[in-house]
Image: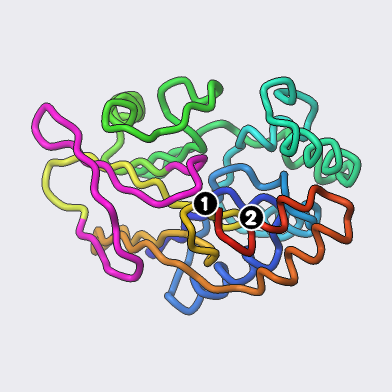
Amino acid sequence: MKIAVLADIHGNLEALQACMAHAEREGATLHVFLGDLVGYGADPVACLDLMADHAGRGAVVVKGNHDEAALGGLCEVMNPVAREAIYWTRAQLDPAARSFLASLPLTAELDDLFFVHASADAPDEWEYITSSAQAGRCMDASGAAVSFGGHVHHQSLFFSAGSSVRAFQPVAGVPIPLVGRRRWLAIVGSVGQPRDGNNAAAYALFDDEERLLTFFRVPYDHSSAARKIIAAGLPERLARRLQRGE
């Protein structure tokens, strides 16, 4: 089975549709959505409708901090731009969208795979995993052979090597064999708001039979997504971030 793992969609319908179409061409048969489904982008309800439809057909979905904020919490710790986007998003959500967000767990498991938005070590504290030490704590807490996370908005891979944890920078489109007795943590990047200087949407595909993980970057119509942000009256900075991938 090939599993498409998508994180940080952030209400960007154009990016979500592009990644899902790419994953279908790559043979994905299961989708996993790693939270931050809304926030920043101009199409929160359309994105949630699409993901809820896939959840009804077996997709795995977990909650992110922006999803929690859209339900009424966490705004006090957000920067002003993120906060403004969340206030706008709250006003767009219909009862079905709110109910779907409220139903989401913080973590999920499938066989020897673990899924979380931020870190398995205290998932409700929304820690950004940017170091080997943080990755090690996440892998220890999950106890899984392969863990998947988002939240950081760029792609990276960590693995255990004896008593240490090391980082590896993946190359888009190049399969990585997840073999041996090592444990792995894949940070899959952001579908809806990449922040690594590349404006192409990001996701990962895991073949659980071949134990191959491939990170992808998918070009999409970011100009249309940016225009929608401006038309909605959201902060202009959010539109610029899509154009620049920052």
* Residue at the (30%, 43%) spot, across then down: 146
Q: Which segment is the magenta one?
A: 149-177
Residue extending farthest bottom: 25
Task: Residue type at mark 1: give it.
Answer: Arg
Where residue 92 sits: x, y (%)?
Answer: 89, 46
* Residue at the (49%, 34%) spot, across then down: 118
**Residue 173 is covered by the magenta coloring:** yes
**Residue 89 is covered by the magenta coloring:** no
Please tell me which residue lies in front, 114 or 135: 135
Q: Which residue is mark 1?
A: 195
Say few, some or many: other residues with alpha carbon within 10 Å of mark 1 (under 14 / 14 to 19 / 20 or more). many
Residue extending farthest left: 162
Residue 48 in sight in this render: no
Tag 2 or tag 1, which sits nearer the N-term? 1
Say few, some or many: other residues with alpha carbon within 10 Å of mark 2 (under 14 / 14 to 19 / 20 or more). some
Q: Which residue is mark 2?
A: 241
Where residue 73 sits: x, y (%)?
Answer: 74, 23
Say if mark 1 contacts mark 2, CB within 8 Å. yes
Element at badge 2? helix
Where residue 57 sits: x, y (%)?
Answer: 62, 58
Task: Residue type at mark 2: give it.
Answer: Arg
Element at badge 1? loop
Q: Is residue 203 above or below residue 125?
A: below
